Amino acid sequence: MPDLGHALLILARNAIASQLGQAARPTDDLPALHEQGATFITLTQRGQLRGCIGSLEAWRPLGVDVRENALAAAFRDPRFPPLVAAELPLTRVEVSLLTPAIALPFTDEADALAQLHPGEDGIIFSCGSRRATFLPQVWEQLPDPALFMAHLKQKAGLPAAYWGPDVRLERYGVTKWKEAPP
């Protein structure tokens, strides 16, 4: 899969570069790029988040998913202004390829927290029409399961202490590739 990771990183960077009127690098057209896949594209500058958008479910070809999520992370993440050409050389691209999410059965919040695998699990929190996710990489900033869950609930627009019978959790894993620092 190292070839796949290299190809995904080039596809993501090329999508952004092309949108900014810059030249694209050649990449291999691997068969895996035509299979359905779900990815998140994370952009950082000097170690700080600059954009992160992705798909939780595989519903389109992997290559298309990477290109579309790269464009969304660079130009449509509502937390940041659109990326400009001068920023691209400072921007580091990371591609996370998600495994299918599986439901996490639990009896209460303490049971759910006890089942989490810090550093491994990506978590999807759903409650009614609210939904949020954290990639496994977020454990680096929030290593405590209770704190991780509190922030995830806030990301979903709920109070950090909220818990109710309508809460649903799913877990997924990722294979990730990251560009070398600029």
Image: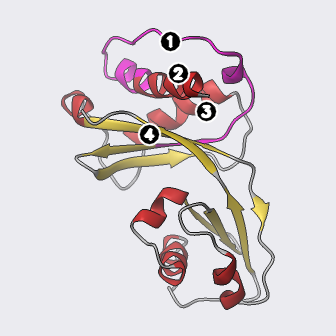
x, y percentage for residue 65?
Answer: 61, 32
Q: Earlier in the sequence, mark 3 or mark 1?
A: 1
Identify the element where label 1 is drawn: loop
Residue under circle 4?
94
Vertical position of residue 124 compared to residue 91: above or below = below
Q: Which amino acid does label 3 sit on?
A: Asp
Q: Using the numbered discs, state the Cα–Cα distance from disc 1 to disc 4 in whole angstroms.
A: 17 Å
Residue under circle 3?
65
Q: Nearer the viewer, residue 109 or 18?
A: 109
Q: Do the numbered discs 3 and 1 sit on residues whose CB atoms are within 8 Å?
A: no
Q: Does the magenta stretch include residue 177?
A: no
Residue under circle 2?
7
**What residue sits 61% from the left and 48% below the top?**
174
Q: Do the numbered discs 2 and 1 sit on residues whose CB atoms are within 8 Å?
A: yes
What colouring method underlies this structural image? Answer: secondary structure
Identify the element where label 2 is drawn: helix
Magenta segment: 14-41
**What residue sits 44% from the left and 39% below the top?**
94
Tell me if residue 135 can be seen: no
**What residue sits 38% from the left and 18% below the top?**
18
Residue under circle 1?
27
Q: Which amino acid does label 4 sit on?
A: Glu
